[in-house]
Image: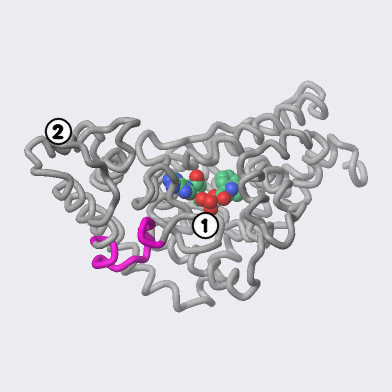
Amino acid sequence: MRIFSGIQPTGRKHLGNYIGAIRQYVGGQERAAAAGDVAIYCIVDLHATTVQYDPAVLRERLYDTTAILLAAGLDPERCILFRQGDVPEHTELCWLLCSVTALGELSRMHQFRDKSVAQRELVSAGLLFYPVLQAADVLAYRAVEVPVGEDQREHLELMRDVATRFNARFGGGRDILVVPEHRIPAVGARIMDLQDPTRKMSTTGSSEEGTVYVLDEPGAIEKKMRRAVTDSDDPPAIRRGDDKPGVTNLIDILAACSARTPEEVVASLADARGYGDLKAAAAAAVVEELRPVRERFAELRPDERLLEQTLAAGAEQARALAGATLSEVREAMGVGPPR
Ligand code: TYM
C-alpha cells in the first residue's frame, strides 16, 4: 500500500499540522513497509508560490519544515522525503491533468474562494490551479492512501474525480492512474484556534495566542493553553459537543497527545474541579508530545548541507517512480514520441 502526502513549507508548523498530519506520516512509514511498499512525503514549495511570498523566506521555511519532519520521526531510510520543486514530473503531470479538470470545479473550491478574497494585489492563476498540482503530486506515485487533516477533504475529492476522468478518457479500459483514498484521523483531524474555537488553527488567519507552534517553548504552550477560550457553563461540563467547541477542542488535543480516546479523557476528568484541570492536563500532554521534536529540531536545523543532501537523495528516488507514471501518461495521451 503506497502512501503519499504533502505539506506546505510556509509559516510555522502548528499543533493542527502536527496532530492532523505529521503524526500520521510517521506511522505511515511502518504501515507502508509492512505492506511491502513505501510512504512518500513531499514538501510542496511550488504550492507556496501561489500567494504573495518572499523567495528568501521560502527557502528558510523549507529547511524549517524539513527539520521538523525529520525531528518528528520521518526517517529517510524508511520513507521518501523530498522537495516538490526538485521533481519536474509534478508540474508536467499538472499540465496534462488540466485536460481532464473542469474549470467550474476549480473555481468552486473553498480554498480558492477563501484565499482569492484575501489576496490584495493579485489573484494568481496558480491559486486556481493549486488543486490540479496537488492531484499531480499524488497521482504521479499511484498512491493508494493520502493522510491529511479534514480541511483537505475537498482537494482529495477533486483528485479522485480527475483520476477517474483520466482513466475513462485515456485509459483504454485500463486504470493508468490509481484513484486514492484519504486517511483522516478519527481524533484531531480539525484542531481549532484556542482563542476562537469555531475557526481551525491555521498558518494564516488564526491568532498568535490561539496557535500552538510545534517549536513553542513549554512556557509559551502552557500560557496559550491556560488562556484557551472555553464556555461559561455553570457548573463547568467537561464533555464534547457542537455547543461546546472550546472544551471539545481541548478534549481532542488531550486525547491525541495522550494516546487515549476522547471518552477515556472525559472519564479521567470526572472529578475535575473545573476547566482549569482540563487545560492543565492538555498543556502537560502537549508539552511532552512536542518536547522531543523541539529538541531534535535544534540539533538538525543548523546543518543545511545535510538537509539538502537528504532532500536530494529523496528527489532521486521520487523521480524514478514519477517518471515511470509520466511515461505511461504521455503515451496514453499521445504526447511526445511513441514509446
Ligand atoms: P498544509 O501545509 O496546509 O497542511 C499540512 C497538513 O496539516 C493538516 N492541517 C490540520 N489538521 C488538523 N487540524 C488543523 N487545524 C490543521 N491545519 C492543517 C492539513 O490537512 C494537511 O494534511 N494542500 C496541502 C498540501 C499538499 C498536499 C498534496 C497534501 C500539496 N500536495 C498532496 C496531500 C497530498 C496543504 O496546504 O497542506
Crowding at dot 2, Cα within 10 Å, few <14 / some 14-19 / many 20+, comes out as few
- Magenta span: 208-222
Q: Residue at horizontal 63%, vertical 54%? A: 118
| Residue 2 in sight from this viewpoint | no
Residue 168's place in the image compared with 74, above or below, is above
| Residue 269 in sight from this viewpoint | yes
Judged left or right of residue 320, residue 172 is: right
Q: Residue furthest top?
A: 173
| Magenta region includes residue 212 | yes
| Nearest the eye: 324 or 163 | 163
SS category of the residue bearing label 1: loop
Q: Residue at horizontal 47%, vertical 42%? A: 149
Question: Image quadrant of residue 122?
Answer: bottom right
Q: Which amino acid lies under the numbered mark 1 shown in the image of this protein?
A: Thr
| Nearest the eye: 230 or 155 | 230
| Magenta region includes residue 312 | no
Whether the residue carrying mark 1 lies under 8 Å from ligand 1 is answered with no
What numbered label is drawn on residue 267? 2
Question: x, y percentage for residue 94?
Answer: 75, 46
Question: Image quadrant of residue 241?
Answer: top left
Question: x, y percentage for residue 273?
Answer: 8, 43
Q: What residue is disc 1 on? A: 204
Question: x, y percentage for residue 219?
Answer: 24, 67
